[in-house]
Image (cartoon, helix red, strand yellow):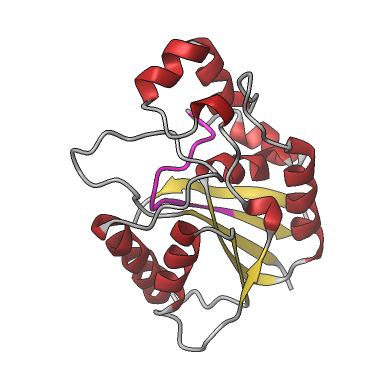
Amino acid sequence: MGLSVFIVRHGNTFAAGEPARRIGAATDLALVESGVAQAEALGLAFARGGIGFDRALAAPLLRTRSTIGGILAQQPAALLVEPADWLIEIDHGPDEARLESEVIDRIGEPALARWDHAAEAPDGWIVDAERRIAGWRDLFATAEGHVLIVTSNGAARFALLADPALQHQAASLPSLKLRTGAYGVIERDTDGLRLAAWDVRP
């Protein structure tokens, strides 16, 4: 059996018109109304595409657990959500809960660009890249079937760094980021791992 991993970023945690802030593992926000709608849209899109999940993993925050719940509500059979601590959001340290403009003032735009394009963490952020990459590698090596993962933007990008072939394919992406309510797909067959989609919103 092959493997298809659907990597979803949780839905919106800020309402339209509300200034977005850098929110990480230290801030457990709920989904706003539009985020709940994003989770439902993802679930409907997967169900209408005939995608039935064999496993489901989520980071242990309210926004990720709510998103995966909305997706799985559209599945024909109940599925137990497995916790995975290597999927939890990163720790933004001194930038936690700050406005994006304030973060840029502190670290500079080049540092933020390195984070978005190469997953190089700015000074003061706690990322634990090795543990995250090890988690993705283990999943890609051992899992089978259709696997649903709901996590954060900070954690999802390390899936693209877990394998040289994925790194090569990801080099053509405009960014390693996933937007809220968007997903990527990584597949494994006899030829290895392949990036099938990234940053797709239903």
| Residue drawn at (51%, 89%) of the image | 77
**Residue 192 visible to an observer of this rendering:** no
Q: x and y percent of residue 147 in the render? A: 62, 68
Residue 151 lies within the magenta run: no
| Residue drawn at (68%, 65%) of the image | 3
| Residue drawn at (66%, 49%) of the image | 194
Q: Which of the 4 image quarters holds residue 99?
A: top left
Tell me where the magenta segment starts and ends, as one range: 175-185
Left or right for 137, reference 47: right
Q: What count of labels does the image hold?
A: 0
Q: x and y percent of residue 139 in the render? A: 75, 59
Left or right for 134, reference 44: right
| Residue drawn at (47%, 52%) of the image | 28
Query: Which residue appears farthest toward the left when viewing the image?
Result: 17
Q: x and y percent of residue 169 in the render? A: 63, 36
Q: Quadrant of the C terminus?
A: bottom left
Query: Which residue appears farthest toward the bottom when viewing the image?
Result: 77
Q: x and y percent of residue 41 in the render? A: 32, 65
Nearest to the observer: residue 122 or residue 8: 122
Query: Which secondary structure type mostly characterizes the magenta part of the structure?
Result: loop
Left or right for 185, reference 98: right
Residue 94, placed above or below residue 187: above
Residue 194, placed above or below residue 6: above
Residue 33, placed above or below residue 95: below
Q: Quadrant of the N terminus?
A: bottom right
**Residue 94 visible to an observer of this rendering:** yes
Nearest to the observer: residue 124 or residue 5: 124
Residue 177 lies within the magenta run: yes
